[in-house]
Image: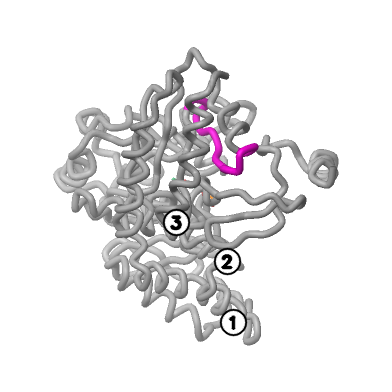
């Protein structure tokens, strides 16, 4: 079997830091992908929300190809004629003064933490290197040593210490706990508006707004990691807009690259971003002209195709239909927009086997946090495509194990 040979190749020569669903993809378009044997699947994971625009969106491919014909990499040692345009587009779209471009999500997280720390020492007057940053339990902010240092997931940390100090953990969704954890050396808090990797965990209503107020009252920075929730996924351009809780620092990644290229960014107003001075921070590939061209196109497509509104409408439909499925395995269906989790009761084991069954029927999804099947299709998905998936999801959730 052709698939098996590709899986064996990865198995033999690749580090085993992932355990993929056994499907070998060779082509993608919109919400669909095809494997090496020609079978078609609907992509209900969207590369963890990096494919909000769908696979190979024509406008994004066009921007990529056009830029490929011009110049791809300049480094920040020089100016290029695309970066400023991307920064303007992103700053105006998100409503911030300044953009700091990076490549991957975790790099943007690290960048946000560096900006916050420097702001804490230079602006807030916290004694140097004594500052702390508050994070939430169940968080996912990426895989660098600093990001895992304030993870509460044992497997993310096990074997990788010593860890970066300077973080305090409070329970997610509990604004009072944040208030209780703040001391005179607290610089910032970093939170996901919805925890995606944590199992599609929605905080209580009002939480984001309360965090905004707590940050204001205590003179600390509010950082939202919207790498997964941002750019339309939850039915608004940014999830913070659901509660009008604009963060001081906004972290974006994933879909900012339009599904074709790694692009991430940190946004803040001048009063915060001005702590960064030449030489403080950088990235060889960050802000390269190819990334900038792709980023502009990704933002334009979100607007032109009104993807946040589509995510809201399609998400409501999808969640309602999922809730109608009668299944003894399902504990809860929850979500916002097209970020949806179906939690399997613990007595039925991991959600993994449901994902494997779904894949056999042509629906790609992935378990997260053991018990949860995440459904997060491209935001361009149509009702009939949701119905196609629902038919198969129902079969898997309703039939005997
Ligand atoms: C995916 C993700 C990251 C890490 O992004 P990478 O590009 O994988 O480094 C960080 N935070 C959140 C909320 C994410 O979903």
- CA gap between label 3 and label 1 equals 28 Å
Q: Is residue 100 above or below residue 127?
A: below
Disc 3 is placed on an element classified as: loop
- CA gap between label 3 and label 2 equals 14 Å
Residue drawn where x is 52% and y is 23% of the image:
399
According to the picture, the residue beneath numbered tag 2 turns out to be: 56
* Magenta span includes 103: no
- CA gap between label 1 and label 2 equals 16 Å
User: From this viewpoint, which residue is outermost toward the top?
Assistant: 347
Mark closer to the chain start, 3 or 1: 1
Residue drawn where x is 82% and y is 41% of the image:
4
Residue drawn where x is 61% and y is 31% of the image:
357
Q: Is residue 113 above or below residue 348?
A: below
Side of 219 relative to 316 (left or right) = left
Mark closer to the chain start, 3 or 2: 2
- In magenta, the rendered stretch is 359-371
Residue 250, image x, y percentages: 35, 56
Of marks 1 and 2, the one in the foreground: 2
**Foreground pick, 73 / 281:** 73
According to the picture, the residue beneath numbered tag 1 turns out to be: 67
The quarter of the picture where residue 134 lies is top left
Residue 246, image x, y percentages: 23, 55
Side of 149 relative to 179 (left or right) = right
């Amino acid at each position: 079997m052709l698939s098996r040979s590709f899986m064996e190749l990865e198995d033999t020569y690749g580090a085993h830091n992932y355990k993929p669903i056994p499907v070998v993809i060779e082509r993608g378009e919109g919400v669909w992908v095809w494997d090496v044997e020609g079978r078609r699947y609907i992509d209900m994971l969207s590369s963890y929300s990096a494919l909000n625009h769908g696979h190979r969106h024509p406008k994004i491919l066009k921007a990529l190809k056009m830029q490929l014909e011009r110049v791809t990499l300049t480094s920040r040692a020089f100016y290029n004629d695309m970066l400023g345009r991307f920064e303007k587009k992103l700053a105006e779209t998100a409503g911030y003064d300044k953009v700091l471009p990076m490549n991957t999500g975790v790099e943007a997280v690290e960048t946000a933490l560096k900006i916050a720390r420097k702001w804490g020492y230079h602006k807030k007057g916290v004694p140097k290197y004594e500052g702390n940053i508050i994070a939430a339990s169940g968080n996912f902010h990426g895989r660098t040593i600093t990001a895992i240092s304030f993870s509460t997931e044992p497997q993310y940390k096990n074997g990788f210490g010593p860890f970066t100090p300077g973080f305090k953990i409070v329970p997610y969704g509990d604004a009072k706990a944040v208030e209780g954890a703040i001391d005179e050396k607290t610089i910032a808090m970093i939170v996901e508006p919805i925890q995606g990797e944590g199992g599609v965990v929605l905080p209580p209503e009002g939480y984001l707004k309360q965090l905004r107020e707590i940050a204001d009252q205590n003179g600390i920075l509010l950082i939202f990691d919207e790498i997964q929730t941002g750019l339309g996924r939850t039915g608004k351009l940014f999830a913070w807009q659901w509660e009008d809780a604009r963060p001081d620092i906004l972290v974006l990644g994933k879909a900012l690259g339009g599904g074709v290229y790694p692009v991430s960014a940190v946004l803040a107003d001048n009063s915060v971003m001005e702590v960064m001075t030449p030489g403080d921070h950088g990235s060889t590939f960050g802000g390269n002209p190819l990334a900038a061209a792709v980023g502009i196109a990704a933002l334009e497509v979100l607007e032109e195709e009104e993807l946040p509104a589509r995510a809201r409408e399609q998400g409501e439909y999808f969640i309602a239909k999922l809730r109608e499925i009668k299944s003894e395995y399902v504990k809860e269906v929850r979500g916002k927009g097209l970020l949806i989790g179906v939690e399997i009761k613990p007595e039925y084991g991991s959600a993994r086997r449901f994902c494997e069954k779904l894949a056999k029927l042509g629906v790609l999804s992935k378990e997260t946090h053991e018990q949860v099947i995440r459904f997060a299709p491209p935001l361009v998905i149509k009702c009939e495509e949701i119905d196609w998936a629902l038919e198969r999801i129902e079969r898997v959730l309703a039939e005997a194990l």
